[in-house]
Image (cartoon, helix red, strand yellow):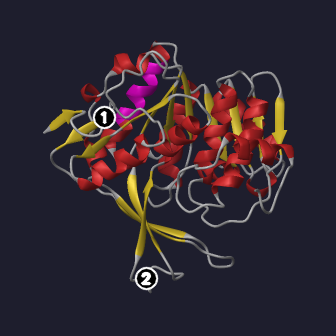
Amino acid sequence: MTKQNTSGGLETDYRAKIQVVSIGETMLRMSPRNVSTLEEANCLDVYVAGAESNVAVGLCRMGIASAWISKLVDNPLGRSIISQIRGFGVDTQKVVWSDTGRVGVCFSEVGVPPRPSRVIYDRADSAFTSLQLDEIDWEYVRRAKLVHLTGITPALGCDCRHLTEETIAFCNANHLALSLDVNYRQGLWSPQEAHDCLSQLIPYVSLLICSIDDARKVFGIHEADAKRALEVLLKRFSMPAAVLTLGAKGAIAFDGERFLEAPAYPSEAVDRIGRGDSFTAGVLSGYLKGDLNSGLRVGNAMAALNQTLKGDFFRCSSQDIERVVGGSYEALSR
């Protein structure tokens, strides 16, 4: 049984000003507090974790009114998720609530080279995977400027794949801009499964965001030169615009007219999870203004700042972003 907005929804009607609507699952992420590995942990810190909600939070921190649509269980765990996301100004009034089901959980272990970081998922049959098309307020979605999705959602099962396909069809039919972050998760599906599904969706996307690693794993694009790799991606899917992230080398993009490049900003890594979503939020902030070049720089700055903090959410200010982009670094600000 489901019900619309009986817990945690905002009373204010944001429909007149919402620019971005993101749709996807959010879980609880648990990480060791004072030790290095999950195996030895006897105390865990709990964070709210979801690629689409992370992007919505990052956009709100940039002053861009954003909403997040999902499905949660109406229990303390679901209400904890909604209260934290809403606390950043994200409009959560269209989240669907369920009396049954569960909140997905993941466990993360931060690695230091050569030991990799890893994530263990416990998200099967979460409430989000039962979200139905008729539970979404499509008239609300129609009033946005852009809808944001990730490749995580179609990896969660047939119903979620259908939801992704129908959302993309809705955006195309209503002339809504649509961004898609490939965000490949090897724990959810194989590279071939991801390739077969996403290849059918990407040609209908306004802006694709993909890492160079995902381009290799999922799409078999192995060009050593980043610009050439992006050209192959663009030619294969005939997209109007795309961004290819290059890790420590920054990012490269095509905005429909020209190729753009922006270097990464060096930063210390405290918690790497969530930095890609912060990058995406920065990119979208520029894309919405018709300035993808600026979006790349802001996205790189947000990614650098995000990994200096624990947790998925972007918690820094626009002034922090300006200092990074401007090359102004202070060890102590007072």
The local secondary structure at tag 1 comes to: loop
Residue in front for this viewpoint, 301 or 249: 301
Residue lying furthest front? 334
* Residue found at x 58% / y 39%: 61
Q: Position of residue 178 (x, y in %)?
A: 54, 26
Left-right relation of 133 to 64: left
Q: Nearer the viewer, mark 2 or mark 1?
A: 1
Give the number of marks: 2
Let me know if residue 168 is in the magenta part: yes
- Residue 160 circle label: none
Q: Amino acid at mark 2?
A: Ala
Q: Position of residue 175 (x, y in %)?
A: 52, 13
Which residue corresponds to mark 2?
41
Which residues are drawn in magenta?
A: 162-171
Let me know if residue 246 is in the magenta part: no
Magenta segment main secondary structure: helix
* Residue found at x 33% / y 52%: 80
Whichever of callouts 2 and 1 sits on the residue coming sooner in the sequence is 1
Quarter-of-image position of residue 131: top left
Left-right relation of 14 to 158: right
Distance between the alpha carbons at the discs numbered 2 and 1: 35 Å
